[in-house]
Image (cartoon, grey):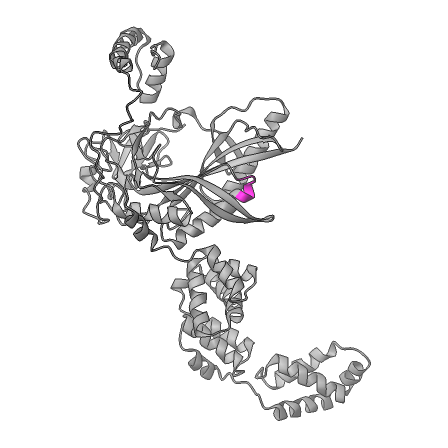
Amino acid sequence: MSKIVVDDKLIEHLLNLSMLGIERSEYDRFRTQIQRILDYIGMLDELKTDDVSPMFGGIECPQFLRMDITQECLARTSAVQNAPSEKEGLFEIPKVIE
Amino acid sequence: MNYEAVIGLEVHAQLKTRSKIFCSCPNEFGANPNTNVCPVCLGMPGTLPVLNRFAVELAVRAALALNCTVHRESRFARKNYFYPDLPKGYQITQYDRPVATDGFVEIETEKGLKRIRIKRIHLEEDAGKDLHDISPDKSYIDYNRSGVPLIEIVTEPDISTPEEASKYLRTLRNILMYLDVCDGNMEEGSLRCDANISVRKSGSSELGTKTEIKNLNSFRFVEKALACEIERHIGMLERGERIEQQTMLYDSKENITRPMRSKEESHDYRYFEEPDLLPLVLTEQDIRTYGEDICELPHQKKMRYTGELGLTPYEAEILVQDKGVAEFFEECALLLKEPKQIASWIINDYMRELNARKISIKQSPVTPHKLVSLIKQVAEKKITLNMAKEVFVILFEEGGDVQEIINRKGFTVVNDSDEILKNIREIIGKHPDELSRYKKGNQNLIGFFIGELMKRMKGRIDPKAARELVKTELDKS
């Protein structure tokens, strides 16, 4: 893989995807950190993997399937107790559409 | 310039399981908000998903009925995006190794059967529900739907018109309902549709830029939204404008499509293997077993009805549109070998009463036995068709027994032709003017004589027999 360059555009894209906001003045600090992470992971690109078949996970055995049986749920008061705000058992959040 | 549309549909169907796909919360519509939730479907840290066997079975059943190849091994992936209805920040779905691929559905078009290829079917979890209408400055979330099992059925871009899209959707919905895989309730969101569409010059093999229309939740909206979008694309191409690849929403009030706000979409899902789930492995035996519950499908029934039972394609089509109706018809046809008459009763009388009462055939008080017994009474000339129709309405309104209602209403048919003839002669004798006008060629007056006869005999006579007898007597007079 070619080396990824962390420019302002990429930082803005990442902020957008992760719904985070940081000050423009902090871009440089994050640029350096993200670049360092990518360079570190990028070491993997140096390995020759042409003859290695793709691996999807560490454990190659089939997954366990659960019977279609219902069980008791959380009490509604417990379900919403960590919500910053709730109303009549609903999670209350800032408006997400205009 | 002529243009043609190239359309592909993605249909999400909620599976009729008891519990959710990765946890044991009930899969039910309409419960109080946030009562069918647990740490797994609320995405709390440290929880792990455990796949529901029956969800897999239903997915395989649908895949086999839709002529797909079911894969012995498939895998789950994480589709990452931030939106409040997705508590984990990712949706567990299948990506490059779906449970089934390469199937097809055949739809009826004006030009005959058309095959719509199915590219893939994959299993995934539904997201929670955002509620935006409660307050002007807040949104609310109900996670009851979070983790409800879905299959996504993706077609190849084989659909050419809005009508074909709607026909495909109807056909697919009916198949899924026959299979008991999905309840097909589009109002409740059990079946939802997104459409990919592009437009190109007729005959061109190059694809135009496509747009996606999301959340088309009725057959009518699918047709109208696609028609709008095709018109928009053609307009832009005619003006030499470039079509932007984007996600659209259909505004049914204004009948237009408009781009989704960027906040609501994200093109970069960063799919990767779901590390919390091992590969889903199915044996040949599993696949065979899951396929055993595939019933006779609507198009197969239709062929049998028109072939073996001699119904018209129109009659067959109406009967197979609802599995309950088809089963009712078949039960009747086992009791009485008169499929045409039974079909006619169901299509004309039965469906009218069902529609008027907004109930399904399963909720109806008129059983196959009762309907057949009524049809038999007419066939054996014990009551007239008009009497039977009256009895039928009473059966619907009050219930009861066919013979008992006939007795109570005093419905009988006079089959004694001497008695009928006696009455006819008396009527003719009393109306010499009408007779002479009839003789001079006013054939319509036969209706007058039949009317008089019916009045006299209180409708207790078969109208067809009455007509024949009246005509013979008039011509003799």
Q: Extreme front residue here?
A: A51
Left or right of residue B314: residue B91: left
Left or right of residue B154: residue A49: left
Q: Would you place residue B234 above or below residue B449 in this image? A: above
Quadrant of the image containing the N terminus of chain B? top right
In this orientation, which residue lies closer to the viewer: B357 or B186? B186
Q: Would you place residue A37 above or below residue A61 in this image? A: above
Task: Examine the rendering and report whether any part of residue B223 can be seen.
Answer: yes
Residue B39 falls in which quadrant of the image? top left
In this orientation, which residue lies closer to the viewer: B158 or B433? B158
Residue B397 falls in which quadrant of the image? bottom left
In this orientation, which residue lies closer to the viewer: B326 or A76? B326
x, y (%) of residue A95?
35, 28
Q: Would you place residue B438 above or below residue B271 in this image? A: below
Quadrant of the image containing the C terminus of chain B? bottom right
Q: Residue at x 52, y 37 (%)?
A: B225
x, y (%) of residue B474?
74, 86
x, y (%) of residue B270?
33, 25
Residue B70 in magenta? Answer: no
Task: Examine the rendering and report whether any part of residue B321 can be seen.
Answer: no
Residue B161 in magenta? Answer: yes
Q: Residue at x 59, y 83 (%)?
A: B461
x, y (%) of residue B81?
33, 27
State the extent of the magenta-drawn residues as a range: B159-164
In this orientation, which residue lies closer to the viewer: B168 or B421? B168
